[in-house]
Amino acid sequence: MKSKDDAQTWAQQITEHMARTAGIETDPATIDALFTPCTGKNGETASDDRYILMYSVKSSVPRAQHPEVVRKVRDMLTGEGLTVQGYRETVDGKPDALVDAFHPSSRYLATAETSGSGDRMYLRVITPCLLPPSEEPSPTSTS
């Protein structure tokens, strides 16, 4: 169980850790936190407000440094128990970097990748399906 605020704070901490590890700065103006309902494999949804958070932030990094950034992030993520599911440093001999890694027990996905044709890098965390804490009933007076 995790509140949406707690999930967003947690995702932000992960992307900040990725950025620090790679020696890059993120742009807080580019933060995007998208909460979507959980959908089962047959399209079903629960009525208990379960959600997935897709959290991202961008950074401006000279494109020639993108491969180095994803190497550093990859090494940090694997050192913390994540499994790399996708990795590249170039496409057609030009910097176009990506690392996708999955945490087997917490089941979140962390990504660092080239974004578009400029110097942008994109850091993203996608949570598994999370359940917000249930609201506690208000205490009632028994006088």
Image (tube, grey):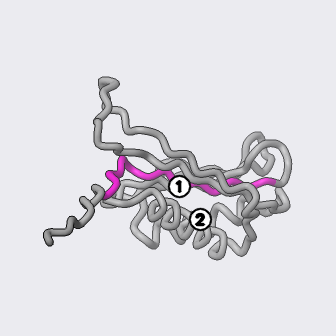
Residue 36 is left or right of residue 59, and the answer is: left
Disc 2 is placed on an element classified as helix
Q: Residues within 10 Å of mark 2 (few under 14, many from 20)?
A: many
Image quarter for residue 82? bottom left
Q: Position of residue 19 (x, y in %)?
A: 66, 69
Q: What residue is at 57 percent from the left and 65 percent from the top?
A: 12
Q: Looking at the image, is 29 positioned above or below residue 93?
A: below
Q: Quadrant of the C terminus?
A: bottom left
Q: Nearer the viewer, residue 134 or 120?
A: 134
Residue 22 located within the stretch drawn in magenta: no
Q: Quadrant of the N terminus?
A: bottom left
Callout 2–callout 1 Cβ contact below 8 Å? yes
Image quarter for residue 139? bottom left
Q: Nearer the viewer, residue 136 or 4?
A: 136
Q: What residue is at 47 percent from the left and 40 percent from the top?
A: 36
Whichever of callouts 2 and 1 sits on the residue coming sooner in the sequence is: 2
Which amino acid type is marked by label 1?
Answer: Val
Residue 17 is left or right of residue 128, and the answer is: right
Q: Nearer the viewer, residue 134 or 128?
A: 134
Q: CA distance from mark 2 to mark 1?
A: 7 Å
> Residue 60 got which mark?
none
Q: Looking at the image, is 139 positioned above or below residue 40?
A: below
Q: What residue is at 58 percent from the left and 73 percent from the top?
A: 17
Residue that label 2 marks? 15
Q: Position of residue 2 (x, y in %)?
A: 36, 60
Furthest residue toward left: 142
Q: Position of residue 3 (x, y in %)?
A: 40, 59
> Residue 125 got which mark?
1
Q: Residues within 10 Å of mark 1 (few under 14, many from 20)?
A: many
Task: Tell me where the magenta segment starts and ends, as one range.
Answer: 120-133
Which amino acid type is marked by label 2?
Answer: Thr
Q: What residue is at 30 percent from the left and 27 percent from the top?
A: 44
